[in-house]
Image (cartoon, helix red, strand yellow):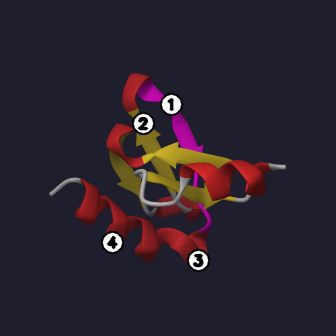
């Protein structure tokens, strides 16, 4: 089910699938924590887990969005 949303949201729209259960708007990322498997802190204090194999990809995408 989430893959359908991923197809719609993640194509050049600033959204990224960061975990098998989460898609986030990269504009709302405050901090990427690499410890304990990795997590994103979003606006309003939300903590979202990230797949450890996607950490570098997420960092790269955040760099692009924040420019």
N-terminal of the pair, mark 4 or mark 3, is 3
User: For mark 2, what is the residue?
Assistant: 42
The outermost residue toward the left is 67
Q: Image quadrant of residue 53? A: bottom right
Taking the spot 24% from the left edge, 64% from the top edge, the residue there is 63
Q: Is residue 35 magenta?
A: no
Q: Nearer the viewer, mark 4 or mark 3?
A: 4
User: For mark 4, what is the residue?
Assistant: 60
Are the residues at dot 1 and dot 2 in contact (C-beta closer than 8 Å)?
A: yes
Are the residues at dot 2 and dot 3 in contact (C-beta closer than 8 Å)?
A: no
Q: Position of residue 34 (x, y in %)?
A: 44, 63
Q: Which mark is residue 53?
A: 3
Q: Image quadrant of residue 20? A: bottom right
Number of other residues with Cα within 10 Å of mark 2, as a class: few under 14, some 14 to 19, many 20 or more? some
Number of other residues with Cα within 10 Å of mark 3, as a class: few under 14, some 14 to 19, many 20 or more? few
Secondary structure of residue under mark 2: strand
Q: In whole angstroms, how far apart are the C-alphas of marks 1 and 2? A: 5 Å
Q: Position of residue 54 (x, y in %)?
A: 54, 72
Q: In whole angstroms, how far apart are the C-alphas of marks 2 and 4? A: 17 Å
Q: Nearer the viewer, mark 1 or mark 4?
A: 4
Taking the spot 33% from the left edge, 72% from the top edge, the residue there is 60
Q: State the residue in front, 22 or 14.
A: 14
Q: Position of residue 27 (x, y in %)?
A: 33, 42
Q: Which residues are magenta?
A: 45-51
Residue 3 higher or lower than 60, as above or below = above
Q: In whole angstroms, how far apart are the C-alphas of marks 3 and 1? A: 21 Å
Secondary structure of residue under mark 4: helix
């Amino acid at each position: 089910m989430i893959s359908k949303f991923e197809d719609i949201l993640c194509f050049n729209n600033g959204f990224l699938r960061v975990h098998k259960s989460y898609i986030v708007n990269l504009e709302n990322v405050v901090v990427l924590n690499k410890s304990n498997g990795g997590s994103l802190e979003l606006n309003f204090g939300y903590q979202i887990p990230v797949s450890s194999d996607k950490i570098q990809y997420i960092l790269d995408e955040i760099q692009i969005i924040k420019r």
